[in-house]
Image (spheres, helix red, strand yellow):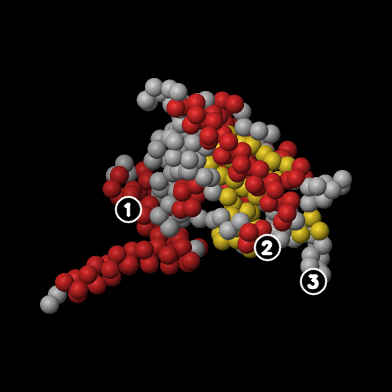
Amino acid sequence: MAFPERAYTVGQMTFAATILTLYPEMFPGPLGHSIAGRALADAKWACETVQIRDFATDKHRTVDDTPAGGGAGMVLKCDVLARALDSVQQTDELRSSRVKSRDSDLAPGEGVSTSLDTNGEGVARPILAMTPRGRPITQARIRELAEGPGVIILCGRFEGFDERLFEARPEIEQVSLADIVLSGGEMAALTILDACIRLLPGVMGATSSGDDESFEQSLIEYPHYTRPQEWEGRTIPEVLRSGDHAKIAAWRKLQSESDTRLRRPDLWERHEGARVQPASGARRKDKERRP
């Protein structure tokens, strides 16, 4: 499945996602529905899949082999994966050159902005490899990806990737979804794409919609309530019914901090470190200024 032609003709930047996988039929999958589906229909993002088997050279289209040194399972072959990835990057370069050539014939200000051109700057898309050996993805990294031209995702299978792929292509970022093992990288890729897509301009509506969500401030979000006011003997906290916005904000902040401290001590430690660091830095600068 290739990018639709309109992904290169819309008058705004389109977030372009290319997924290298053994199961291209899994995409866009759930991302073709709800918020992400509407954004796809509106060309706010584009989805392309690449079948890794197409880059195997033998008649059986072999993409894996037994692990060196023995052991269970199979390992994805580095030569096949490299050919697949190189083809995507070469296509990116050709598309970018085509757009630049077309735009050079237009009057100033008439050129279009596409995901593979980024207003003529030619910013390369990040390459993620989904593997439990990778660095856990964070909301901060998701925001960085969403602000860029798009992403190329390699979906692992079996026992994983031949390590030489990462040695030969150091630009590949090894990423893990969580401390869990999935049957393949496709579900993790869908999750990461969903997290990116909802942050694209115009997708969620109000630009501040995601500002208070979990992880945005290294905290989990405060608890939510809605009608009915009383349910099974439990009522909505009085402060949320008070109409006092300052008190509501303070209550939510307290709940967010309390729940983070209890449920995610790792996040709480990071949050506290971020608060303490500027203060300690200011003290150091103050000492340096003193005679």
Q: Position of residue 284 (x, y in %)?
A: 24, 72
Q: Nearer the viewer, residue 132 or 125?
A: 125
From what the image shows, is residue 285 above or below residue 27? below
Answer few, some or many: residues within 10 Å of disc 3's Cα (few below 14, many 20 plus, some between 14 and 19): few
From what the image shows, is residue 239 above or below residue 202? below
Q: Say which mark, if any, is on residue 69.
A: 3
Residue at the disc numbered 1: 250
Q: Nearer the viewer, mark 1 or mark 3?
A: 3
- The amino acid at mark 2 is Glu
Look at 56% across and 39% down and name the residue there. 93
Residue extending farthest to the left is 291
Residue extending farthest to the bottom is 291
Look at 36% across and 54% down and name the residue there. 253
What SS does tag 1 mark? Answer: helix
Q: Say which mark, if any, is on residue 163.
A: 2
Q: CA distance from mark 2 to mark 1?
A: 49 Å
Q: Is residue 226 visible?
A: no
- Left or right, 94 with reference to 257: right
Q: Nearer the viewer, mark 2 or mark 1?
A: 2
**Residue 170, quarter of picture:** bottom right
